[in-house]
Amino acid sequence: MNASWETFTAVPPADKLDFFRKDGRLYDCLFAQQFDRALLDRLCALADHMRLITKERAGDDFLRGLLADKRAMLYFSQPSTRTFLSHMSACHILGLRVMETRDLKTSSEVKGESLDDTIRTFASYVDLIIMRHHGAGVAERAAWVLNRSPRPVPVINAGSGPDEHPTQALLDVYSLQRYLGTVDGKHIVMVGDLKRGRTVRSLSQLMGNYKGVRLSFAAPDAFRMAPDILEFLKRRGVPYRETSDLDSALSDADAVYMTRIQDEHDKDGESGRVDTGPFKLDRARMALLPERTVVMHPLPRREEIPAELDDDPRIVIFRQERNGMWARAALIAHIFGLEERVLAYRRPS
């Protein structure tokens, strides 16, 4: 697209997917709507295969040799533990050498350099940019700039303001499939700060790829799911209900996706005025859940899942965390066109 940035941003995500694809596959991973069912299934299968073959040294060496000639930049303007480390680990699985910028005070942006120039500078040295930025739409802007430049490199959005977190949604779907067998036909309850939580926004959009999924949104009135996501679900025919009564949603839940209050987005201290007590788990609420249910959380957590509940096998938050490394490694392999080569590898007998 040769349109200006202002014109480009006005285009719905579904209408600009091809701009972020090359050679028939995903090139830049920026928003959840880029994942269709076929791609989700392939990436989950790829992640499973990568886990399997790295159980032996030969398979681990094979994967580490695939991108040993490539470099990646981790550009994070927001604090991060899991997202940063899992992307770094995913790069290491495939042999990518990694550079990082985690403090904008160490960047020439403090001297007045534009974001566009910063991104193009990174692209001069690396073959992949993985970025988390506090500003909405910044990762998309980076990909737009690079795709129009003489040296385009792929961009992975590792969290963009309060709007998108596509790789978290990918690992969440991967976790649901691993622990429930399938996402089709499941009842998923999302709890907490749904208005400002980019993880639940992106995961909700992916639910449009599955059959028979039902969603329940349990949140204080101040933090209800944003209207644009509700409208998206209506268009995709995904049934949902909103409730302030968490207990009523738990009895037939297949998965409960807890989130913390996103008070870093407060403008007037509103989080402190909202009663979040009814949206936390305890022993009594765990007793309401079926034995098959899994409890997930993008982390970090606060009081919404007390550590005293961690002995309950239904709470899979740390296994979910580890899944992120494999899901992101699968995504990177796909972006670099390695999918078939990885799947063709078989462990020596």
Image (cartoon, grey):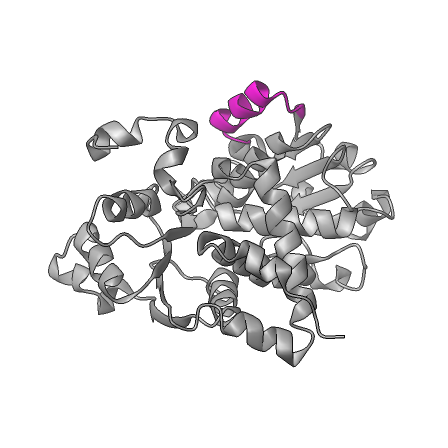
Total labels drawn:
0
Q: Is residue 57 at least partly visible in the picture? A: yes
Residue 45 percent coordinates (x, y):
66, 52
Q: Name the image quarter holding residue 279.
A: top right
Closer to us: 78 or 205: 205
Residue 133 percent coordinates (x, y):
35, 52
Closer to us: 287 or 185: 185
Residue 49 percent coordinates (x, y):
67, 60
Closer to us: 291 or 206: 206
Q: Is residue 100 left or right of residue 54?
A: left
Seen at 64% across and 80% down, the residue is 57
Residue 262 percent coordinates (x, y):
49, 47
Q: Name the image quarter holding residue 312.
A: bottom right
Seen at 61% across and 47% down, the residue is 42
Seen at 28% across and 48% down, the residue is 142
Give the quarter of the figure containing the N terminus. Answer: top left
Tell me where the magenta segment starts and ends, as one range.
Answer: 225-240
Q: Is residue 267 at least partly visible in the picture? A: no
Q: Is residue 264 left or right of residue 9?
A: right
Residue 239 located within the stretch drawn in magenta: yes
Closer to us: 222 or 333: 333
Q: Is residue 331 left or right of residue 304?
A: left
Q: Is residue 182 left or right of residue 34?
A: right
Q: Identify the main secondary structure in magenta.
A: helix
Give the quarter of the figure containing the C terminus. Answer: bottom right
